[in-house]
């Protein structure tokens, strides 16, 4: 997990999430499976520099590389991240990460939510879809108007994901219960978002997010704007934060399950059971592409359309299409 704010250009983590309803989400991170020991480790097991109560930058380094490293300078924020100090407890009989993933994809509920879709034209002529939730099965939850200055949360789903995904909808419900406005940013082609130019989206393409954030900030000029991203959506979000640095209009952002090093992530995709996920994502990308093949007919340059049409892995799709997107 990475938490950032307007000072993302520095090496420290600065964040101010007033009454932040998402502080407990770290409990669900599988990468924190090993977690921190419940009691202070033996001497030499870890090195701690600067206590949280000192007000200086808090750093926790572990010799075990599987454990997370926490770096921050906001004493108040760091003191609230109590879940990171406890071991991750998986759902009963779900100790294997693959079992957890498959179980959730099959059995996790899909909340009933209705959206108003706003198609936003990008500067290059492309189009993205913003889905604003306004109703659902729990009528009482959605009745009434939120205060005009309520916080706004922009959601960036993972690769091929969108407002139809269960994890996205559960976050929308959580945001609403805490009095937050929310909107799902469906990238080009995702969740039936129209593709109007040969420019596809990728982890290195942040121009759409930049325009979406500006649009939401103008629409909710009296509100603090936040963003949360999963997987590739998180990668795009963090890249955007680094690019805009001190000029970021977001008051805060959360990165979930981010494949920070895409080269390493791609290699891991081709190991063992991970191939199942790679093929599933490639199938989703091909499905999006097949709806818009005419846009890419007889296109020249670095594109390899035949490879894209038959892509059996995310790498094949990336080699054939997204690397041709400038």
Image: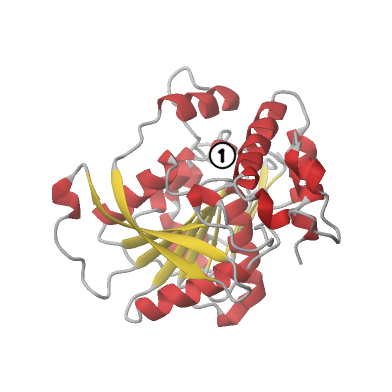
- Residue found farthest to the right: 301
Asked which colour scheme the image uses, the reply is secondary structure
Residue 186 placement (x, y as % from top left): 50, 56
When asked about the image quadrant of residue 210, the answer is bottom right
Asked whether 326 or 35 is in front, the reply is 326
Residue 166 placement (x, y as % from top left): 41, 39
- Residue found farthest to the top: 93
Residue 14 placement (x, y as % from top left): 52, 70
Whether 252 is drawn above or below 170: the answer is below
The residue sitting at 66% across, 40% down in the picture is 286
Asked whether 270 or 219 is in front, the reply is 219
- The crowding category of the residue bearing disc 1, from other C-alpha atoms within 10 Å (few below 14, some 14 to 19, many at least 20), is many
Give SS at disc 1: helix
Whether 214 is drawn above or below 93: the answer is below
Please name the residue that numbered disc 1 is placed on: 32
The residue sitting at 50% across, 46% down in the picture is 84
When asked about the image quadrant of residue 312, the answer is top right
Q: Is residue 253 visible?
A: yes
């Amino acid at each position: 997990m990475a938490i950032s704010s307007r000072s993302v250009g520095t090496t420290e983590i600065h964040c101010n999430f007033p009454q932040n309803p998402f502080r407990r989400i770290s409990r669900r991170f599988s990468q924190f499976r090993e977690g921190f020991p419940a009691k202070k480790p033996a001497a030499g097991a870890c090195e701690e520099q600067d206590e949280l109560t000192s007000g200086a930058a808090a750093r926790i380094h572990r010799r075990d590389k599987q454990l997370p490293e926490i770096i921050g300078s906001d004493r108040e924020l760091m003191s609230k991240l109590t879940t990171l100090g406890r071991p991750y407890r998986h759902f009963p009989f779900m100790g294997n990460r693959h079992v957890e993933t498959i179980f959730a994809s099959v059995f996790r509920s899909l909340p009933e939510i209705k959206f108003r879709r706003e198609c936003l034209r990008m500067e290059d002529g492309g189009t993205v879809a913003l889905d604003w939730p306004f109703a659902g099965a729990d009528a009482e939850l959605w009745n009434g108007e939120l205060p005009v200055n309520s916080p706004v949360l922009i959601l960036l789903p993972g690769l091929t994901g969108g407002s139809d995904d269960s994890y996205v909808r559960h976050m929308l419900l959580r945001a609403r219960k805490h009095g937050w406005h929310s909107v799902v940013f469906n990238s080009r082609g995702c969740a039936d978002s129209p593709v109007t130019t040969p420019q596809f989206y990728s982890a290195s393409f942040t121009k759409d997010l930049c325009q979406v954030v500006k649009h939401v900030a103008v629409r909710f000029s009296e509100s603090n704007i936040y963003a949360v991203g999963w997987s590739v959506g998180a990668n795009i979000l963090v890249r955007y934060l680094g690019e805009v640095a001190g000029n970021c209009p977001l008051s805060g952002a959360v990165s979930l399950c981010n494949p920070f090093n895409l080269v390493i992530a791609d290699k891991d995709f081709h190991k063992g059971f991970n191939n199942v996920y790679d093929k599933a994502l490639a199938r989703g990308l091909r499905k999006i592409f097949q709806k818009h093949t005419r846009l890419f007919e007889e296109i020249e340059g670095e594109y390899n359309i035949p490879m894209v049409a038959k892509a059996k892995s995310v790498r094949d799709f990336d080699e054939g299409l997204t690397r041709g997107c400038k």
